[in-house]
Amino acid sequence: MAKRVCILIEQDFQDMEVLYPRYRLIEAGHEVVVAGLGQKTYKGKYGYPVNTDADNSFKIMSGTSFICKLAASLTAFFMALEVDLP
């Protein structure tokens, strides 16, 4: 059964903390949503760009149910603490 997983990102995220889990989760048949604070594209520490999904923002994603939320940077982790996530 496929699950919904949210990966929270911010500028200068650790590239492999986003890219590797994202592709492995997609391969396993799960729905992966990438969310940030409103930018469409974020660049990782080594320059790899990652687009957020649709027109989402971090606050919109906070009201959505996910099986797991992964924070790809320390900033994204603290953003998750400040927003009331289910």
Image (tube, rainbow, N blue to C red):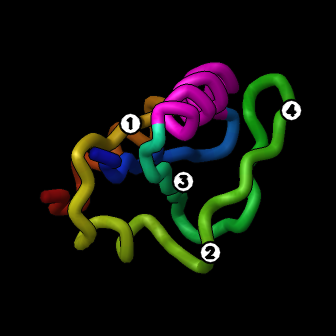
| Mark 2 secondary-structure assignment | loop
Which mark is nearer the camera, 1 or 4? 1
Disc 2 or disc 4, which is closer to the eye? 2
Q: Earlier in the sequence, mark 1 or mark 4?
A: 4
The kind of residue on which mark 1 rests is: Leu
Residue denoted by label 3: 34
The residue located at (63%, 60%) in the rendering is 52
Query: Distance between the Cα atoms at labels 1 and 3?
Result: 10 Å
In the rendered image, which residue does mark 2 sit on? 54
Magenta residue check for 45: no
- Crowding near pointer 3: few (<14 within 10 Å), some, many (20+)? many
- SS of the residue at dot 1? strand
Q: CA distance from mark 3 to mark 4?
A: 17 Å
The residue at 37%/47% (across/down) is: 5
Which is more N-terminal, label 4 or label 3? 3
- Measure how far apart labels 1 and 4 are at the Cα level: 20 Å
Outermost residue toward the front in this view: 1
- CB under 8 Å between discs 1 and 2: no
Tell me the residue that label 4 is attached to: 47
Q: Amino acid at mark 4?
A: Gly
Quarter occupied by residue 76: top left
Q: Amino acid at mark 3?
A: Val
Give the residue number, with chain letter if any, for mark 1. Answer: 70
54 with respect to 86 (left or right): right
